[in-house]
Amino acid sequence: MALASPSDASATDTLGLLKPITRSSVNESVYQALRNKLMNGEFRAGQPLGIQYLADALGTSTMPVREALRRLVAQQGLEPLPNGTTRVPLITRDKLADIRRVRMLVEGQATEWATPRLLPAQLDELDDMARRITRARHAPESLPASLEMNLVFHFTIYQAAQSPVLIAMIESLWLQSGAYLRATRAYLHTDEQPSDHLHEQTVAALRAGDAAGARRCMEQDIAWVFDRLDPELPDHPPSTPLKIRPTP
């Protein structure tokens, strides 16, 4: 007995649930994938990023990769090389100190503005993420998930500030500083970290409507991570990986 073919109406209904795959959606997906990897420190400082290599890894053509790299160069997350390729910028002591200072300023401000705007459901979600980040940081195999969750935690707060201009600045700063996260990973799953408590304290301040307190917690969280880097960074781009100061 032959199976009945679906009616034209049911087929149309099913197709209506599908979104057409456009070039713009592919471009955005490739951009978001590379953006998140840069922000999470999955590329090392100075690492060259070949277009064909990335296209093969992402299972796409070179065109969306070229467009994504162009956007990331414009955001200062990558830098162009004379041979036409791009690389993750090398880190100097002066640049790191500058990024640290500006990140504390703008992310602290975003947290302050977000305080009266976060909804109870969002605060519950932030509470849950803070606890999950703490658990994941103490399990080396969960570190990639921890870094991704950390990104979502921070940007859930920043988006609530409802300032597209400020968000664009913060994204650029995360792109520029992502490579140092790679260097701090070795210490994120060892002993209990003060930053674990700072996430929870940030949420507590947000829930209490304490904008100034939430800002202080966020600034301390950013400072803690930057302070894990060895203070004796070179004045010029290093040729070796950055060293980390262990937690006292």
Image (cartoon, rainbow, N blue to C red):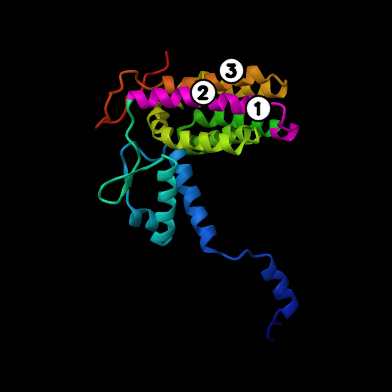
The amino acid type of the residue labelled 1 equals Trp
**Which marked residue is nearer to the observer: mark 1 or mark 3?**
1
Residue 38 is one of the magenta-drawn residues: no
Residue 238 position, x and y percent, is 26, 30
Q: Which residue is mark 1?
A: 113
Kind of residue at badge 3: Arg
Secondary structure, mark 3, is: helix
Graded by Cα atoms within 10 Å as few (under 14), some (14 to 19) or many (20 or more), the crowding at tag 3 reads some
The answer to whether 67 is drawn above or below residue 205 in the figure is below
Q: How many marks?
A: 3
- Name the side, left or right, on which 2 lies relative to 244: right
Range of residues picked out in magenta: 93-122
Mark 2: give few (<14), some (14-19) or many (20+) Cα within 10 Å.
some
Element class at badge 1: helix
Marks 1,3: beta carbons within 8 A: no
Hey, which residue is sitting farthest front in the picture? Answer: 165
- With respect to residue 224, does 133 lie above or below? below
Q: Which residue is mark 2?
A: 104
Dominant secondary structure, magenta: helix
Farthest top residue in view: 248
Q: Which residue is mark 3?
A: 216
Earlier in the chain: of badge 1 and badge 3, it is: 1
**Cα gap from disc 3 to disc 2, whole angstroms:** 9 Å
Is 56 or 23 nearer to us in this picture? 23
Can you give x and y, in whole percent of width and height, for residue 71 in the image?
44, 48
